[in-house]
Image (cartoon, rainbow, N blue to C red):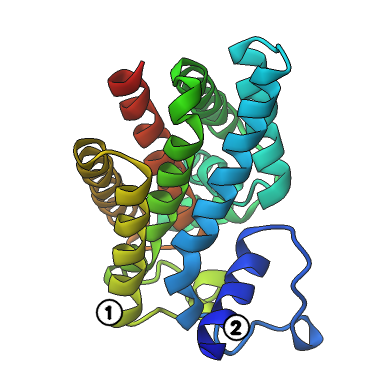
Amino acid sequence: MQQWLDDFKTAVAFLTRLPMPHPDGAMPGNFVRAHRMFPVVGALIGAVVGLTCLILRWLGLPDLAAAALALGAGAILTGALHEDGLADVADGFGGGRDKAAKLEIMRDSRLGTYGALLLLVSFAAKLSALAAIPDGHVVYALIAAHALGRGILPLMSVNLPYARTDGLARNAGQPDAGVALTALLIALVVALFALSWANAFWSALVAGASALAMAWLAKRQIGGQTGDVLGGAEQVAETAILLLLAARLS
């Protein structure tokens, strides 16, 4: 039980801006194992975003405004960790001529045209989807989307080679198959509790398709994974799930 609690704290420290210090600011020794708690932390992030949206609606804000402010609150909570990854992937894959150039662009902290455009498209898609989901489903939809979006990351990490010889993803290490499958199982259980069986099934299918598409694209573009690739995959899956649920629930 203590290991699970330690893993939860490490996952919170990595996926959010909440203060969960570890010794000397170094990468915790349990970071790889803590991947199994990613969907749990994702579900909590989704609950915060969903409750924010719901409260703002109850206060009388228009659905679009409530959705925009809730998404903004989510970005503050997470430090826009995955959004940054999505933007870097767009800039690198869109602007680099070869693998080395793509990786160099992805490492650059400045936001380029491709990244800005993809962030705009992603935010607009999530905004419109969230605004369309009824009050009774908005919290549950976000819990499922955030849990599944993070639940696919350990499995991607296990099956993709590293694109760099250094970097955060490589230094952190890869989780083993047991950790990845545990994370995926937890994400599926969360989705089944949050959604109907049919919606949970389709959401899981969309998350899996998003992971496969991003893995294929990353392998083709740069030969494997980076932290940005995993962050981008989470955003693609989260957005796709919210669009699916908006279509099915509205």
| Type of the residue with mark 2 | Asp
125 displayed left or right of 206: right
Residue 201 image point, x, y percent? 20, 43
Residue sitting at x 66%, y 38% = 111
Q: Is residue 187 visible?
A: yes
Disc 1 packing (10 Å; few <14; some 14–19; many ≥20): some
Query: In the picture, residue 171 is in which quadrant?
Result: bottom right
Of callouts 2 and 1, the N-terminal one: 2
Seen at 70% across and 12% down, the residue is 61
Dot 2 alpha-carbon crowd within 10 angstroms: few under 14, some 14 to 19, many 20 or more? some
Which of 137/69 is in front? 137
- Labels 2 and 1 touching (C-beta < 8 A): no
| Mark seen at residue 186 | none
Give how far across and how far down residue 152 sits, in percent. 34, 58
Disc 1 element: helix
Nearest the viewer among 107 and 5 is 5
Which residue shows up at 27% across the image and 70% down it?
Answer: 159
Residue 152 can be seen in this image: no
Q: Residue at x 60, y 23 (%)?
A: 67
Camera-near label (2 vs 1) is: 2
Q: What amino acid is labelled 1 in the image?
A: Ala
Residue on which disc 2 sits: 6
Relative height, residue 239 to residue 186 (above, below) = above
Question: Looking at the figure, which quarter contains the C terminus?
Answer: top left
Q: Count the marks: how many?
A: 2
Q: Position of residue 85 (x, y in %)?
A: 55, 49
Q: Is residue 179 above or below residue 144?
A: below
Q: Residue 122, image x and y in percent?
A: 49, 29
User: From mark 2 to mark 1, how far is it between C-alphas?
Assistant: 20 Å
Q: Secondary structure at mark 2?
A: helix
Give the vertical position of 61 relative to 223 (above or below): above
Report the residue marked by disc 1.
Answer: 177
